[in-house]
Amino acid sequence: MTIDHQVSPWFTRAPVSPVQERVIQRICARSAPAGTPVHVSDLPFGGVQIWMDGDEDRWSLYHRMARELRLAGWHVEPAADRLLVLGWSADGLTHRVQVLAAALAGRLADHDLTVFMAVTIATRLCQEGQPPETVVDEVEARLRDDLRWPDRLADLDGLQRTATLEPLRLRLAQVVGLEAKVRRRCAEHLSLAVRVATAVAGGSVPPRARLSRLNTCLSERVVAASVPNRPPGRSPDVVPSLTDCASSPR
């Protein structure tokens, strides 16, 4: 297993940045009971520790958190009273590539299921007498939960991922490229669900459904530019132009 203990300046050379701390905290908070605070701090010799207060079954909670963090590509060591995040894991990043690719070939490739779910949910809500705006918002929320990836990718907002080891930089670049495709595909599904729900419930299509493709393309370019395939501290030679969005393959 290859582990990069100097993923970015926050390992061994400086404390964890507020952005990275918030990302790890958001990921762990999804596995914790509602209202339970999740504490994150850097370790003296590099890495991050996560712990919770209270008398809950912390062992099982820590293992659920560890699973989510490993899915993001980190090397995680569960202890009796805390979790230790020790850098990027080559095996973890390879697994993330496989999971993202499976999502693109599986649920995210099935637009018919999205249409069926949107029609079913919207019809039932209309029969209950819900107003059109409520129907559209509820359909979008339920499809977001079904796809799962929108929330998982939102947890990573603002995170800059770099590595000192070339194999890990290549894997990180591959992960970011697949995440951009998953983000774009999720936006397509949610836009489709909103349009179908609007057709069932009546009303006009919300602006977010009409602009989702442009926003997704911009997000893809911004995220890709933030993860250069080079060691930390070096400026990229070429920054992708946002005008290339129009010619990006779907």
Image (tube, grey):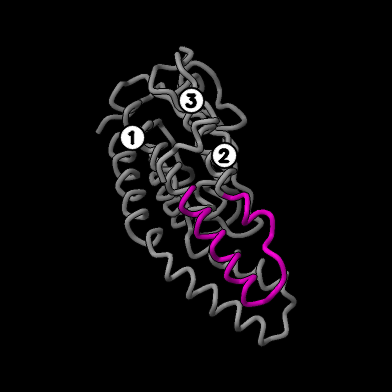
Residue 26 percent across, percent down from the top left: 57, 46
What's the CA distance linking mark 3 and mark 2? 19 Å
Kindly report the distance in space between the C-alpha atoms of the residues bearing marks 2 and 1.
Answer: 20 Å
For label 1, the residue is 89
Magenta residue check for 121? no
Eye-nearest disc, 3 or 1 = 3
Residue 79 shows in the view: no
Dot 1 alpha-carbon crowd within 10 angstroms: few under 14, some 14 to 19, many 20 or more: many
- Does the magenta run of residues contain 194? yes
Dominant secondary structure of the residues highlighted in magenta in the image: helix
Q: Amino acid at mark 2?
A: Asp
Q: Nearer the viewer, mark 3 or mark 2?
A: 3
Residue at image mark 3: 240
User: Where does the magenta region start and end?
Assistant: 184-212
Circle 3 Cα neighbour tier, 10 Å, few/some/many (<14 / 14–19 / ≥20): few
How many labels, in total?
A: 3
Mark 2 or mark 1, which has the lower sequence index? 1
Element under label 1? Answer: strand
In the foreground, 12 or 98: 98
Q: Secondary structure at mark 2?
A: loop
Task: Determine which quarter of the picture holds residue 122.
Answer: bottom right
- Mark 3: amino acid: Pro
Q: Nearer the viewer, mark 2 or mark 1?
A: 2
- Disc 1 residue type (three-letter): Ser
Q: Position of residue 78 (x, y in %)?
A: 40, 44
30 relative to 223, above or below: below
- Which of pointers 3 and 1 lies earlier in the amino acid sequence? 1
Which residue is rendered at x = 40% and y = 37% of the image?
177
Reading the image, the residue beneath label 2 is 157
Most foreground residue, 77 or 215: 215
